[in-house]
């Protein structure tokens, strides 16, 4: 059933198409932005709280997507794969922090950049060994495989709305976690004063490990839910990483609100850019970053 | 003549004598390494001496390379003496333009925006018509070094190319050494040591950082030009972030903040790459793992290990 | 205001809701060493940061020789003649003491295009550095790497670097911080020597030092100026005694305890 009634003069051009086209692009832009936010918030948390710049963050997104692919093939259900995959990502995050990232807390940025760059190479090769270099598709779960019909020619996939909804829920949960729980308080305290937290008897390393695992899980989760829409392919980690960097630069390092605002902005600019100027579509994001750098080099929001 | 200079003279003599002893394959390999050494030294000016960690230096390397490929006529060779300065100038201008944006960013932001801008250039060459797309460009002829019809050497010959690159390496090394002891170079090093105090002492730090970024980009473009010269072929992977990461890796292998580190690092990097590639197809895995282990256990690089056996540092704080 | 070199008018600095410096007006004159006293958190370091340009003012004006400089950046202020030293030693640790001063002096003769000349060979800069080291009493330590200097020598280097830029105004933020009695005495002598030729603003906790060198004292509390005047007047002021110390302290009486040191 279309959402709006048909025009009075059937047979002529349908003016609702333009309106609905705009609505579709808007929804797409918001959905892309929210997905970026999920990934970028992990990046900005890890940097803002632990002081580590992590180039491998895109790889976690890719790992999530490949987990969705392999686990959904095994279990037959994407939703089960996502649940299991998120759990595995948390474990991966804890293991990585224990083995490697905990050594990076006091190191300078160049060393962090190089180590995480090496990690990208390792992850890419492991992925290539395990899942090959082909592009894979992931099925949308049958329960969500529907479309809302807008006009005779236009409809909007329910799954995309589901993605946006899930991202909002996760964002809300993160807000609650960071601002309304004791763990969140420790995280915020750890961001501003590591020594103080330690002298209060709290284990700062445990706090950092949790934050890191959370960051990894966010990125992987985003990759998992995006898999049916974006497919699963080798370069996806790098692609999302660069955009996330732009999100963080625009939004301000360490600011989760900034990441949200910037991610939505970029999602919309990128989506509408592709529609309006297909040739230069990829450049829109960089131009936005250049403009922001001129006016607010510290990002739109300072560190919260 | 102090120890350092003697070591340099010996190294130069070895490099100069090498073609007489080595097969063509190795002459070409060392030529490739020397080109990478120029690339690494250019980045060292920015990272090791001015303290600006850029993860996008490959952009200027690629611009220098594409400058040759795009300016080379289809049916006759380009002129070295025209296209080389042109490429360096173009890379320098690109660095000036990009720098005027990115130098505003501090610390981590700087790393991220340099990566982002380099990706933008990669996008331009990979996805638009400007660079003829992801297949790259092949050049039909090597540039000739002719002035008024007379060509003192033939860049098509491996040994001639080798000595031309070696001469360029020596020239760049000498230029950077002079630059670093000049007022400009001292300012760069002051910025690395304590940028806040430099501002407080009255230095307009933005301009100096931009100058460092521009010079580094121009010399990086020179290295890219030589690379296109050697291989006769360019493609967008020259601007990839793998390239940017690799040149940073060369610096950490060879030791930051010493010009010879760029040269040592380039040799070490290519040696590692050749070794791993001969071991397995999955050499990137070994490579990545080596980088991770290197950063954890040997952050000072090869030179850092050597330092532990050296006598305590002299009073002279600047070393090349 | 007419012959003041550096002057502020109603200078304020707010951080969100917190007013760190409120409505401060003062003047610095050449040859008149002006000290800034006050308990911790009184806003003294903030005020110095406002004057040097390390912090932007929220409102109010700063003028240098009658010219409004409120919107100038820190490096611009240094170039017009405002020099400062820092409370937390802020030197180039990896360079020698001489190179620290030479680099400072080079800021006056930048010569960025002289790419092929050795910076150390340029006589005016070299001589300015040598003079600054001499004035600060560090001539013998010229070739020692700054990180290896004693704490007191590093504090002297702090000031030498500011001197090497040839400023008219010197903003000195606790130059005696962490010094032993001998070193402090030498620093006081240095301040006395510098006083006549510069307009000095001195933030210091060491009462003996302050009363030995200052001609004008301003007392700040909670970001505001409590009282300003000659040392005698400040010493005798009950408001200062009350607000600053809450009771009779080293400010009481005509003579400070022999060899004793203030808070």
Image (cartoon, coloured by chain):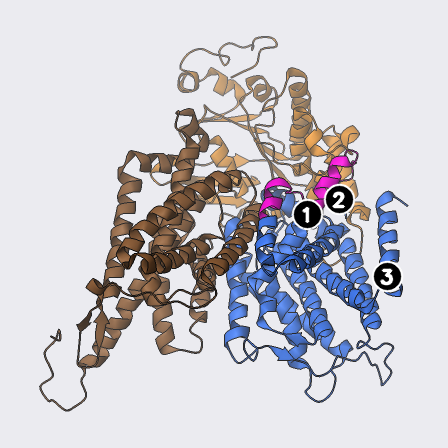
- Which residue is tagged 2? B318
- Badges 2 and 3, same chain: yes
Question: Foreground residue, A7 or B304?
Answer: B304
Residue at 11% in and 84% down = A7
Picture layout, residue A289 above or below residue A104: below
In the rendered image, residue B221 lying in the magenta stretch gets the answer: no
Identify the secondary structure beneath mark 2.
loop
Q: Is residue B172 left or right of residue C26?
A: right
Say if the magenta span includes residue B303: yes
Residue at image point 53% right, 21% down: C231
What residue range appears in magenta?
B292-319
- Mark 2 and mark 1: span between their CA atoms? 9 Å
Is A200 rendered above or below residue C164?
above
Q: Is residue A112 shown above or below C131?
A: below
Point out the frontmost of discs 3 and 1: 3
Can residue C20 be seen at all in this image of the molecule? no
Q: Quadrant of residue B43?
A: bottom right
Which residue is more in the foreground, A75 or C11?
A: A75
Badge 2 and badge 1 in a common chain: yes
Identity of the residue drawn at 57% across and 43% down: A108
Q: Residues within 10 Å of mark 2 (few under 14, many from 20)?
A: some
Q: Colour of chain A?
A: brown
Q: Chain of mark 1?
A: B
User: Circle 1 sits on which residue?
Assistant: B189
Could you tell me which secondary element the residue under label 3 belongs to?
A: helix
Q: Which residue is mark 3?
A: B18
Task: Tell which circle, 2 or 3, labels the residue nearer the N-terminal end.
Answer: 3
Chain B pictured colour: blue
State yes or no: discs 2 and 1 in contact (Cβ < 8 Å): yes
- Residue A41: give x, y in percent of width and height: 37, 51
Instruction: Provide residue B30's location: percent of width, then percent of height.
Output: 77, 62
Please report, as a chain letter, where disc 3 is located.
B
């Amino acid at each position: 059933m279309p959402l709006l009634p048909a025009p009075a003069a059937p047979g002529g051009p349908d003016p609702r198409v333009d309106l609905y086209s705009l609505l579709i692009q808007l929804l797409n832009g918001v959905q892309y932005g929210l997905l970026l936010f999920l990934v970028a918030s992990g990046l900005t948390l890890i940097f803002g709280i632990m002081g580590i710049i992590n180039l491998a963050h895109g790889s976690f997104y890719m790992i999530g997507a490949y987990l969705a692919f392999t686990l959904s093939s095994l279990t037959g259900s994407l939703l089960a794969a996502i649940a299991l995959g998120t759990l595995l990502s948390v474990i991966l995050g804890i293991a990585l922090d224990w083995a490697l990232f905990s050594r990076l807390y006091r190191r300078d940025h160049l060393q962090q950049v190089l180590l995480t760059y090496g990690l990208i190479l390792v992850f890419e090769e492991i992925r290539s060994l395990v899942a090959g270099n082909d592009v894979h598709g992931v099925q949308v779960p049958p329960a969500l495989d529907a479309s809302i019909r807008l006009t005779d020619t236009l409809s909007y996939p329910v799954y995309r709305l589901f993605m946006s909804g899930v991202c909002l829920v996760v964002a809300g949960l993160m807000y609650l976690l960071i601002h309304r729980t004791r763990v969140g308080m420790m995280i915020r305290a750890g961001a501003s004063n590591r020594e103080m937290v330690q002298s209060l008897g709290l284990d700062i390393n445990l706090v950092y490990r949790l934050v890191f695992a959370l960051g990894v899980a966010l990125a992987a989760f985003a990759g998992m839910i995006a898999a049916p829409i974006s497919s699963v392919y080798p370069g996806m980690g790098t692609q999302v990483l660069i955009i996330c960097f732009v999100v963080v630069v625009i939004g301000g390092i360490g600011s989760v609100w900034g990441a949200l605002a910037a991610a939505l902005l970029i999602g919309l600019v990128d989506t509408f850019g592709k529609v309006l100027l297909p040739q230069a579509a990829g450049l829109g994001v960089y131009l936005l970053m250049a403009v922001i750098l001129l006016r607010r080099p510290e990002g739109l929001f300072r560190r919260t | 003549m102090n120890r350092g200079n003697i070591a340099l003279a010996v190294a130069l003599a070895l490099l100069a004598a090498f073609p007489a002893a080595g097969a063509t394959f190795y002459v070409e390999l060392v030529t490739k390494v020397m080109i990478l050494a120029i690339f690494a030294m250019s980045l060292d000016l920015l990272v090791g001496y001015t303290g600006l960690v850029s993860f996008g230096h490959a952009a200027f390397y690629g611009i220098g390379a594409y400058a040759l490929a795009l300016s080379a006529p289809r049916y006759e060779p380009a002129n070295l003496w025209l296209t080389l300065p042109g490429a360096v100038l173009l890379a320098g201008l690109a660095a000036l333009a990009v720098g005027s944006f990115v130098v505003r960013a501090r610390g981590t932001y700087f790393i991220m925006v340099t990566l982002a801008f380099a990706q933008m250039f990669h996008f331009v060459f990979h996805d638009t018509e400007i660079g003829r797309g992801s297949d790259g460009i092949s050049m039909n002829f090597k540039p000739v070094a002719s002035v008024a019809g007379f060509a003192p050497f033939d860049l098509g010959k491996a040994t001639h190319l080798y000595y031309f690159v070696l001469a360029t390496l020596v020239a760049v090394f000498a230029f950077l050494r002079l630059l670093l002891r000049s007022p400009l170079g001292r300012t760069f090093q002051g910025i690395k040591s304590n940028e806040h105090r430099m501002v407080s002492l009255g230095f307009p730090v933005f301009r100096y950082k931009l100058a460092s970024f521009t010079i580094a980009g121009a010399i990086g473009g020179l290295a890219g030009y030589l690379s296109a010269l050697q291989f006769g072929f360019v493609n967008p992977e020259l601007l990839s972030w793998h390239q940017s990461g690799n040149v940073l890796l060369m610096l950490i292998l060879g030791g930051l903040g010493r010009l010879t580190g760029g040269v040592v690092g380039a040799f070490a990097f290519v040696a590692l790459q050749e070794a791993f590639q001969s071991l397995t197809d999955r050499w990137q895995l070994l490579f990545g793992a080596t980088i991770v282990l290197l950063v954890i256990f040997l952050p000072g690089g090869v030179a850092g290990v050597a330092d532990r056996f050296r006598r305590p540092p002299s009073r002279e704080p600047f070393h090349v | 205001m007419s012959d003041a070199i550096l002057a502020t008018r109603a200078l304020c600095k707010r951080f969100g809701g917190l007013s760190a410096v409120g409505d401060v007006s003062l003047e610095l004159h050449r040859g008149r060493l002006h000290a800034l006293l006050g308990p911790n958190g009184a806003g003294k370091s903030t005020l110095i940061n406002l004057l040097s340009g390390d912090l932007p003012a929220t409102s109010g004006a700063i003028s240098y020789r009658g010219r409004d400089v409120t919107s100038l950046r820190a490096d611009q202020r240094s170039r017009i003649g405002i020099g400062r030293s820092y409370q937390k030693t802020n030197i180039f640790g990896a360079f020698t003491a001489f190179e620290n001063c030479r680099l400072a002096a080079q800021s006056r003769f930048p010569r960025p295009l002289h790419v092929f000349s050795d910076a150390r060979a340029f006589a005016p800069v070299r001589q300015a550095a040598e003079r600054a080291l001499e004035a600060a009493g560090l001539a013998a330590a010229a070739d020692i790497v700054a990180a290896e200097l004693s704490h007191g020598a590093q504090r002297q280097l702090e000031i030498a670097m500011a001197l090497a830029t040839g400023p008219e105004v010197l903003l000195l933020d606790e130059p005696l911080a962490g010094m032993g009695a001998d070193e402090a005495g030498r620093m006081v002598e240095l301040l006395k020597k510098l006083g006549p030729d510069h307009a000095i603003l001195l933030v210091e906790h060491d009462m003996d030092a302050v009363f030995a060198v200052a001609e004008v004292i301003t007392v700040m509390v909670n970001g505001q100026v409590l009282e300003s005047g000659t040392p005698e007047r400040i010493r005798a002021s009950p408001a200062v005694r009350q607000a600053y110390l809450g009771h009779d302290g080293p400010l009481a009486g005509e003579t400070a305890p022999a060899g004793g040191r203030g808070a």
